Structure formats: C-alpha cells, structure tokens
Image: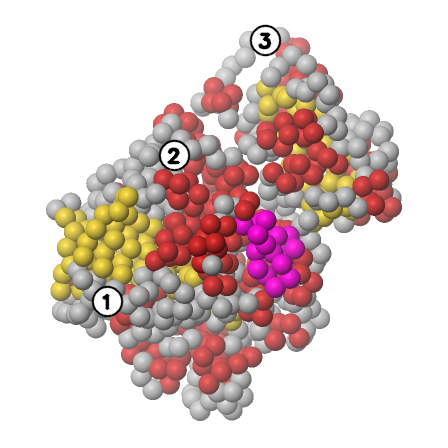
Amino acid sequence: MVQQFQEIGRDLYVGGLISSHGGNISVRLGDRVVIKRRGAMLGRLKPHDLIETGLEKNDSGVALASTELLIHRTVYMRTPALAIVHCHPRTAIAFSLSRDEIVPIDNEASYLLKKVPVLSEEFPSGTQEMADTLANALQAYKIVVMRGHGSFATGQTLDEAFHWSSTLEESCDIALDAKLIGESFIEYRRMSEAYGKW
Amino acid sequence: MNGWFGRVLDIDLSSACIKTLPLDEQIAHLFIGGRGLGARLLWDAVKPGVEPLAPENVLIFATGPVTASGYQTSNRFTVTTKSPLTGTIMDANSGGFWGMQLKKAGYDALIVRGRAAQPTYIEITLAGISLRDASHLWGQRVLATSAALGQNDNRRNVLCIGPAGENLSRIAAIMNDGRRSLARGGPGAVMGSKNLKAIVVEGKDRPGIQDQERFKFLLYESRKMLRASPLTSQALPEFGTAVMMNIVNRIGALPTRNFTQSQFEDAEAISGETLTDKYLVKNASCWACPIGCTRISKTDKIESEGPEFETTWAFGAQCGVNDLAAIIEANHLCNELGLDTISAGSTIACAMELTERGLLASDVRFGRADLFAPTLEAMAARRGIGNELAEGSARLAKKYGAPELSMSVKGLEMPAYDPRGMQGQGLLYATSNRGACHMRGNMLGLEVLGLPKLIDRFQVQGKASFVNLHQNSSAAIDSLIVCKFTNLAVADEYLARVLTAVTGVPYSTGELIRTGERIWNLERLYNLREGFTRADDTLPPRLLNEPVASGPSQGWVSKLDPMLKEYYRTRGWDEQGVPRRKKLDELSLSNLVNSEQ
C-alpha cells in the first residue's frame, strides 16, 4: 500500500501533473479511506504520510487528512470507485478556462476518454457543493476537470486513475500543439461528432 | 417501454393454464432483467422451505432489455430456480440463440410452474402457445430431442433436458441449441421434476430502442474495444476459453487431483494451444458475438462443440487426466446426457480420492479417463455407483464419511482456480450466493490478467472491496444481459450507456453497479430466508488448512477469515452476514423484508 502511494505520487510529480505540494490520492478499503496527509508532498511520501479514516464516520485520522477528504468520501459513496487521483494538469486546466468540455482529438484519448466534462463551482475546493457536483459527474465519467483547479480521476486502483489523468494531459498537450500549428484539421475518426455527446 | 416488452408468460403445467402478465415497470427498472428479474420474480413465486423438486418450485427463464438488441453478445438468457443441489437461489445463463428467440417472441420472462401429468413440451410459435405431448421424446438424448423438435429449422430454437434431468440428477443441466447449457446447480432436474422435456421458441419481433443514433455509436465503440483487446480479439478466438489452462497453471493456481495440488504436470497436453493444434475443426459463435470463443472439435470418435476451459480442467487436471481426446468425448457425453460438466468432473474427482483413500469401493481412480463414459452414463441413469454420484460431490463425500473431500461451497463444486493462489477468488467462492462460482465476479481479471490493472493475488487486506464491486458488477451484467467476455474489454461505463440508450432510463455507471448490489442483496435475503448462515460462507477445510506443497503458491492457504469480516463490513451487513436495515433502505429492498414479518 505504501509503495503504491509512493510510486504514483512520485510519477505525478515527475510527470509534471502537480506542483511540489499539490494534488492528492486516495484508495477505498471497504468502509475506510486511506488518503495522503495534509501538506505532504506527493512526490516524496513517507509511510506516516498515509492517513486512514472512516468512509462515513470521522475518527482521529481526519485531523491529519487532506483538505479534500470530503470530496473523496462523497465520490466513494456515490460511485463504484476504489481509487481517486486528483492532480493539476496545466494544459487541461488552461483549456478548462475557456471550455465546458474537453473532447480529445488524438486517437488514444478518444478511445479511452471520449469526452471530459469541465465543471464549475464558486468555491472549487473542499466544499460539499463541489463534492456533490464532482461525485455526480463521476457517476458517468472516469475523469472530470474542475475549472481552474484540476482533474479528478477514478479507478479500481491508483494505477488506473493515474492512467486517465496522464492520458488527459497528453491529449490536451496534443490539442494545444495542433492549435499552435494552426493548420486545418482533417477528421480521421468515424462518428467523431458522437464523442461530444458521450 | 423500450428494451422491455412489458410481458411475462406464465405457464402452469399442473392446470395447463397459460397466461400473459404485465411486467411491473418499477421492478424492471430496479432489477433490469435476466438474473435480477429472475431473482425478484422467484422471491414472490416460491415460498420459503419449498422442496426444489416439488411442483411448487418454478423455473423462470428471463431475458434482459439488451437481449436481441443487436449489441455485441446480446444473445443471452438466464434460468432462475431454487437449486436441488444447494438449496440456494440459483441462476444459470447461456448464450446461443434460444434467448434471443424468446425475446423476439415478445416476452421478457417465462415462468413455468407445477408439474405436468405426463411428459410435455411447450411450443411458443408465431401461431400461438401450446403444451404438447413429449412421451415419444422421454428418454431421448439432447441432440435427438433437439432435432426432433426442429432445432435445425431457421427460426426455431429448442431448449431441452436429457436423461440426467429426467432422472432428477442434482447436477443436471438444461441444454439449448443442442449443445449449450444452463448448467450449474441442477436446473435440469427441476425441469425433469415438472415432466417438462423441452421448450421450443420462435419469434420475429425486436424490442424498441430508445436512442438509435446513440446506440449505433456505442456499438461502434464497443466493437473497437473488443478488437483492441488481445483477449477478445486473439486469445479467445484462437484458443477458446481453454487459453486459461497454461496461464493459471503457470502461477500455481490450477487445482489438480481434487485440489491436492495446485499445478498439473501435464497442463500443456490439455491446454487451449493443444486443443487448437490437434482437435479444432473451426470456431463458432453465439448470435451477435464478434468474439467467437466456441470450439468445434473432433476426435477419432466424435465431432462436438467445446470443451470449455472449466470442462477441460474438471475432467483433466482435477481428475489427473492428460488425454484431451477423452476429455472432449466426456464433454460431448455430458452435453448429450444433460449434465453440468464442472460438477460432473469434480464429483468424479471426489470419487477418485474417496477410492484412493479406501473409503469407496470403485474403479474410478485418478488418471482413469477410460471410465468417464460408463460413469457418466451411470450418473445420468442413476444406476449403481452413478446413482450416488448423481447427487453431487457434497452428498457423495458425506455418505462415505469424508465430507471434507468435497471441493464445494454450499454444495456447488468449485471451478478451476485454487483459492490458495488467488486470495480474492477464495472470498468470491465463499460468498457467492449460488455456491462456489467464478462467474460472480472477475477476480481472475484483477489477480491474474491485469484487467483493468494487476493487483497482488496473495494480498488479503482490501480484497473485500474488489470482490464486493465485482460481484455487484457481475449481477448487473447478468441482468442486461450480455456475455462476461465482452466485459473483459468493454467497461461497465459503456454498458450503463448501452442500457440507457436502449431503454431511455438514465443509468449512470454508479446506478448500474448499485442495481447489481440490489440484486446481490436480494439473493442474499433469499438464502437467509432458506436458513443459510455465516457458517455457509466458507471453503473446504483443505483450502483453509493445507498449505500448497510446491510451485509458485507454495506455503499458502486461503486466509478467508479476515477477508470475510472485511467483506461483511464493506457490504453493510452485520457480523453474521445479515444486511442491515440501513443497507436495505438504501437499496429499496426493505419492503420485501417487511412483507415477510
């Protein structure tokens, strides 16, 4: 368990998906949640940086847990997810400032993600409103983006949720590059318009 | 109602009364179809304590809203009943064409009650529904029965039992399309107890699809997924389900000689690769299936469909047999007689160990493939020692004073994965509502195949959550109803969207899984109502106490107890495995329990 957290946390930092102290990750163990400690660096996690607390009920662990524990709990209670990766992918965040959804144009993300909704909340961190909005969206999507904040991905394992997170950012980088090149786009996917309706 | 026809056909064989009932829309939404709908209908139809082979038991054949929609593998249907083998709720499902025909005949489900005065078959055709005399078919084997009732006709599909079902073997299967089976838990015996030899169906209508455009996109995307996955595009079409033999053997989780070992030295000889190299005639597939895992194989004596991995294991490694031709022939004979191949092979393996230990006077010993045919014939006819084997391994082992030698859970023989090498699989077996079952949750995907990601197969902590989720997911998939192999490539989120596109009822992934959880809890309530307790959620003592002697799983036993405690807690059940009121409220099941009080 510690090793999984350390490896995924390190990869998120090295992959440029978070700043030094940004993002958080968690797993669900039945009616318990294991989540990163508040203020801990995801890229340098130590065993004591993993905090276990109740899924529905608080215990002393809650005092140390990430400020976004509320969001993780709500997502776990309303979706089948067993792992969550929250990070700050910069190109995806940039796109989130001007779009209500990110529809990948590259082949891999079209295949894996189809469409990623962008959600908006007045107070986009640690609130019940945001938790509700996110949890509802994650019933239908494996990854979503909070406008100006970052992505939340779910999976059965941390590995899986990390996969969706890095795929989204790579896809946004490609979309940005395509925009910078500025040439007209040749559609190569059958039924491509349907991705926007995913 | 798109997806559902909104009609249930209800046939009472005792009174020859044939009725069409409306399908309650709320029940359809809460339980979907197939396994879920079957469980819900059984709850009302069979009162507690009914003897499984009495006329008061029912057989419920159910399709789902996706059946016959044209979605990949949307050919399946289930049968639900109270099992004569386990006494639990039992559903079995099957592919092929029959389920699609029942749906096209305009029914979401068919309930068969009572007992006919003489051998009978049901005919559901474009001209109407009738009960017909089957006296001339009684005693006939499956292929002959199917042919006599027009199986080869373009539009007619036949479901029937063989001699094993007629003679009330507790491990008798119901066969459809001549060669496919609804096998586990003895539904064939229930059909035999009703004097019902066969059900012939032809249909022509298709259920409506709410959002055709969306459905087409989902079909296209799912096809891409199925083509991209090496499992569904290469491994299964090329080697069939027996592709698992070498994989499971390599990790030391292939039960061998009645689970006394967990690796078989001759696995290669009975593997999917050998089956393809030496015996495969061609592939085949169910209706609307692009995978095509079905084998048509040929030996010097017969040409037949199969065998599947579980069958190859049950008559192979489990019996210490390395003769693949003999296994193919045993599979063919089981299909002809109408026997569950897993239970038949495993019960013979149990008899082999009883004999080796001097507890049973018989010739069946590990490696004796030459005795498969006479033993199976005797089991179907309930003749001599076969009469005892027809009862399944749990009753057999108990009779000879060694109940611990039955490798079963709740009386249902275990499939081809040794829980000592796959801890999550052990918890899956122990908690499965129909007894030991590998189809009630895909721990194989997580612990062996890396689907969606590989987890440590020996890890204990945290396994309950995975088992829980996969059991819920499998209940939902069995209710849509599509093939589990589709789900190896196509995730639950796709299936939720397919269900929504077909029915117009908005199912998110979470709601689909929650529906599966509702079905799982309903099945649990049924078993509790029948007197099952925490003590039944266990594994054979061998797996709990005898460490694997050698190979990659050496030294391991199943660490069931901590996983089971975690499992109950994560399910929202109490320490005795009884769903708490809060959980039942969440799942809209409280009204069922209240009505019982």
Question: What kind of element bears circle 3?
Answer: loop
Q: Chain ID for label 1?
A: B
Magenta region, residue range: B567-584
Q: At x 68% / y 14%, what residue is drawn?
A: A97
- Does residue B436 appear in this view? yes
The foreground one among B478 and B302 is B478
Residue B136 location in percent, x, y?
Answer: 13, 69
User: Badge 2 is on which residue?
Assistant: B503
Residue A121 location in percent, x, y?
Answer: 68, 20
Q: Chain ID for label 3?
A: A
Q: Is residue B336 above or below residue B131?
A: below
Does the magenta run of residues contain B579?
Answer: yes
Q: Give the tally of numbered discs.
A: 3
Q: Between tags 3 and 2, which lies in front?
A: 2
Q: Give the label on residue A183, or none.
A: 3
Q: Give the label on residue B115, or none.
A: 1
Q: Quadrant of residue B362?
A: bottom left
